[in-house]
Amino acid sequence: MFSILENCMLVPNVHMMTVYAPDVAKSALPGQFAIFRPEEEGERIPLTLADWNAEEGTITVVYLNVGRSTAKLASLKAEQSLPTVVGPLGNPLEIERFGAVLCVGGCYGIGSIYPIARALKEAGNTVISVLEARSSFLLYWQEKLNAVSDRLVYLTRDGTRGKRGHIGSLAEIIRTLPMRIERVILNGCNYLMMRGSQETLPLKIKTIVTLNTLMIDGTGMCGVCRVTVNSQTKFACVDGPHFDGHQVDWAEVTQRRKAYLQEEIIPLRTTRPQ
């Protein structure tokens, strides 16, 4: 069993959990994920590692409450335990000295972009972090990201902080920067990554996305996470989760992500207090 040290809501519907999992913490690298199971006989949920401390043996994830299993995860308290935490899984993100790198995070992706920005900064890159949200009250971890970024850019749909707009304004933001961006890394919902990739394509900037596909085992055995990248079938868990955003078949990814929307909603409706 894996002890929960902290589990709280950062902003509406976005939660952070810190768990004692020393074997995962000592091997974790930026961009990897872990499989969580909130209860015995429950489903397995892949969550990107947002932070870790190898000395203390802890890992931290940021997740969105969208269905029965994440609702159960959000209901757990400190000092309770999880039956399963498996990881680190997936390939770590390529970290080199590229030059100027734009790290874009939205929703739970703000949390998972943090260790990537930190590693890129430590590798000697100029890091510009873009935080995207519907409104300023949905932003979090600004201080943490500011500490590992050369510049922090806010993009809110209602204009309550930073530039007014959404991910469709990414190309405009890039054009206003005083340096050439050598690489863009997108982390968040599928729409953010798809739309962001469309924005950077005409600019011919290498763009890396972290696909959050459906997953069961996380080791390539079930095939549920298959995606098409550059006209080839890939498994997000073992071939990714990082891919060139310009080569992803986004129509297929979107269709597969919608396959179980009703199954996610129905348990919430049936368990809601009358």
Image (cartoon, rainbow, N blue to C red):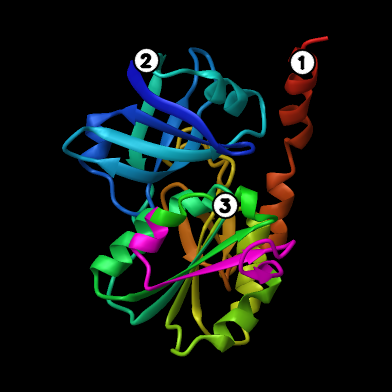
- Quick one: 155 or 231, which is closer to the camera? 155
For residue 213, side relative to residue 151 (left or right): right
Closest to the camera, between mark 3 and mark 1, is: 3
Q: Residue at x 36, y 43 (%)?
A: 89
Secondary structure type for disc 2:
loop
Measured in 3D between alpha carbons, the distance from the residue under mark 3 to the one under mark 1, in whole angstroms, is 28 Å
> Quadrant of residue 193 in the image?
bottom right
Measured in 3D between alpha carbons, the distance from the residue under mark 2 to the one under mark 1, in whole angstroms, is 26 Å
**Percent position of residue 263, x then y:** 74, 28
Query: Earlier along the polypeptide chain: callout 3 or callout 1?
Result: 3
Q: Quadrant of the C terminus?
A: top right
Residue topped by disc 3: 139
- Quick one: 205 or 133, which is closer to the camera? 133
Q: Residue at x 50, y 18 (%)?
A: 76
Query: Earlier along the polypeptide chain: callout 3 or callout 2?
Result: 2
Q: Is residue 173 magenta?
A: no
Secondary structure type for disc 1:
loop
Q: Which residues are magenta?
A: 144-167
Amino acid type of the residue that numbered disc 1 sits on in the rendered structure: Arg
Secondary structure type for disc 3:
loop
**Percent position of residue 249, x then y:** 65, 64
For residue 195, side relative to residue 108 (left or right): right
Residue topped by disc 1: 272
Amino acid type of the residue that numbered disc 3 sits on in the rendered structure: Leu
